[in-house]
Image (cartoon, helix red, strand yellow):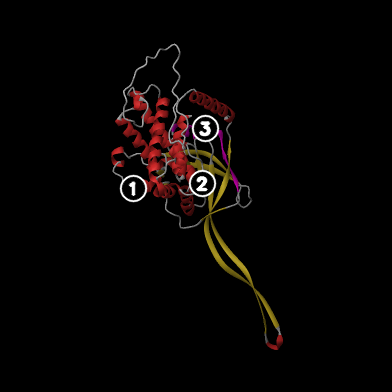
Amino acid sequence: METNFTKTPAPKTPLIGSTDSYNLVIPDSVEFRIRQWCMLNPSTEWSGTLFYTVEGSFENKDIEFTVRDFFVMDIGTAGFTNYKETPEICSYMMENDLLDCKTGLIHSHNNMKAFFSGTDANTLAEEGEQTIHFLSLVVNNEGTYVARVTRRIIEEIEGIRRIKYTTYDGEEVSAIENVKTGTKEYIQYIDLNIKVNNPYAEIKKSISERFSELISAKRNTFSGPKYMDYEDRFFTTRKPEVPTTVKTPKVEEKPKEPTLFSNKDFDTEETENYIKEIAVQLLYGNILLTYDNFSKFTKVDAWITTNMEKAFDRRFGKDEGGFSVFQDWLYQVCDTIIFSAADSYVYDGKAIEVDTAAFEIALKVAVYLQELVLKAFKEDTIADCNVNKYIAYIFECLESYNK
């Protein structure tokens, strides 16, 4: 069997949810292993075989599932993972006393929310067609999980037919017949309540809170660019104050042609093109775009006003869940591109500190994106432009670097 989360074909049998709900218990030893795998792969999806046991029954409404272990088979990319079952799974079961276990699926959504996407649902239905019961557990870095188990249902619908008629000699006759009105077959999934046995939950919570406090305090000490003013179409920048003990000589600068950059460390044509390159990579959702091949495009305005929203809806889904996936995806892509550029500027001596460079880069990227949007909508202010939710969130991500 091949488990493929990238392009799972549409199932032949319908997938229908149930109102029932049962428990899935995750012991502390298994929870520790899940946390370790998520820590090692914070930005990539991973997947593998889940081993679990069952007590009780569906008939008595007391069935309970317990995860015994899992065996990771693949480390994928930020958006997908797939693997084929191999003999090493059987070897792992024998070596770890798991031969009495049922097998299912576990995979991580890394930084995204834990939910069953359209692809995950197709996998659930496809595997549910081939097995008696299929259990799938979705985990993430945050530690929130969801799980479903399937069963194949054959539903036969029978009814009663009553007939009445009068026969010879005026005798009235009535009869009742059982009539089979139809058969329906489908894969039913049941949502499971996750019960995580984690004796260190409070310790982890306190560490996480302290970590957030320190990161927030570090960012708040930066006196850099402020939020974007959509009405005025520019960013205002507050430079760090110079200590009174430092004497800065006044140097009269010669007038120069205006560019996207006010900081002399970034005031080069090469850097300006690189900023534009980052902007269009975010706009098109394609990190392979360069400034050279972007400059050859002729339908940028149509992309911004019409085509972008349609394309991203097809890629991520029109519903709230799909947009949530886009938000998580864009955050990771934006962070990777911006900080990669910031690291290179620090390495080249164009900036002293990475966070400061990242703020400056995000600032300039947003300015250039504003220019493209205003040109596309033929408006004077961003507030007058009917930007789609994807463009709005790109701006929101870029603004986050100014905090």
* Residue under pointer 3: 32
Tell me the quarter of the picture where residue 208 sits. Answer: top right
Return the residue nearer the eye: 140 or 4.
140
Near mark 3 (Cα within 10 A), the count class, few <14, some 14-19 or many ≥20, is some
Work out whether residue 18 or residue 224 is closer to the camera in this orientation and state it. Answer: 224
Helix, strand or loop under label 3:
helix
Distance in Å between CA atoms under marks 1 and 3: 51 Å
Residue 337's disc number: none
In this rendering, does residue 116 appear at all? no
72 up-or-down from 180: above or below: above
Q: What segment is highlighted magenta in the picture?
A: 21-40
Residue 326 image position (x, y, % from top left): 45, 42
- Dot 1 amino acid type: Lys
| Furthest residue in direction bottom, as rendered | 169
Q: Name the residue tied to disc 2.
A: 320
Earlier in the chain: of badge 1 and badge 3, it is 3
User: Which residue lies most toward the top here?
Assistant: 245
Relative image position of residue 353 (x, y in whole percent):
40, 22
Residue 151 belongs to magenta span: no
Foreground tag (1 vs 3): 1
- Name the amino acid type tagged 3: Phe
Q: From mark 2 to mark 1, how far is it between C-alphas?
A: 28 Å
> Who is closer to the viewer here, 378 or 209?
378
Residue appearing at x 68%, y 87% in the figure:
168
Contact? badges 1 and 3 (CB < 8 Å): no
Mark 2 burial class by Cα count in 10 Å: few <14, some 14-19, many 20+: few
